[in-house]
Image (cartoon, rainbow, N blue to C red):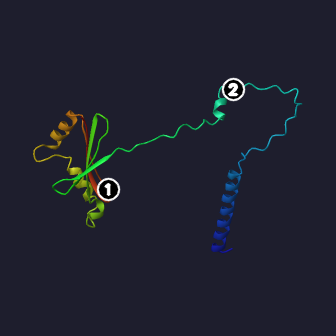
Amino acid sequence: MTTARANRRMAVKTSLSVLAVLALSCSGQKGVAPSPAAPTASAASVKPVAPGPDAWRNKEPPEGPRAVHEYPAVETSKLDNGMSLFVVHRPAGVVSMSVVALGGASRVPEGKSGLAALTVRMMTEGTTRKSSLELAEAVESLGTSLEQSAGRDFVRLAMTTLR
């Protein structure tokens, strides 16, 4: 028998085995042989069985009222430097701010993979006035989080703080 013929034969056997397993698993039956039929009793001798403590699990709960979700209004404006400003007021004691700029990994020259992520990461690693440690301590002392991320088409700096 040639090698190609043996490979084809093995592929057919494997395919048939997979189809058999799929057919058995989709039939809804377990791999256990059916038990012999139990003797039937007359209707008069059958006593009603009390429901178990988990009988409520067999009944689907009724549908509740449809939830209404109202999206908050978004105030938009343009700053003098051309940046768009979006403000969403929410009744919470937390303020979240994000600066998102077009750019990211798609604008990095070939061979400079990771440059966008490195650049935005360095923006949270200190300033001309504060070292990395001083900035981290200042952020922590205010109960604030300072985050950065770079995607394929954007870079983002975000800050969340208490009011």
Identify the residue shown where x is 67% and y is 66%. 12
The residue type indicated by label 2 comes to Gly
Name the mark on residue 118.
Answer: none
User: Quadrant of the rendered structure where residue 32 is?
Assistant: top right
Nearest the camera: 68 or 137? 68
Residue lying farthest left?
129
- Report the number of discs: 2
- For label 1, the residue is 151
Q: Which of 83 and 136 is in front in this view?
A: 83
In what element is the residue under mark 2?
loop
Q: Residues within 10 Å of mark 2 (few under 14, many from 20)?
A: few
Q: Where is residue 67 in the image (x, y as percent from the top left)?
A: 48, 40
* Lower sequence index among marks 1 and 2: 2
Q: What residue type is labelled 1?
A: Gly
How would you rate the neighbour count of disc 1 (Cα within 10 Å): few for under 14, some for 14-19, many for 20 or more? some
x, y percent for residue 53: 66, 25
Whether 147 is drawn above or below 115: the answer is above
Q: Indicate whether 25 appears above or below 19.
A: above
Which residue is located at x 17 percent, y 43 percent? 132
Q: What residue is at 16 percent from the left and 46 percent from the top?
A: 126
The quadrant the C terminus occupies is top left
The residue at the point 25 percent across, 59 percent down is 115
Which quadrant would residue 112 be assigned to in this image? bottom left
* Secondary element at tag 1: loop
- Residue topped by disc 2: 52
Labels 1 & 2 near each other (Cβ < 8 A): no
Report, in whole angstroms, how far the alpha carbon at label 1 lies from the one at label 2.
Answer: 54 Å
Looking at the rendered image, the quarter that the N terminus falls into is bottom right
From the top left corner, tell me how far across and down residue 29 is, in percent: 72, 47
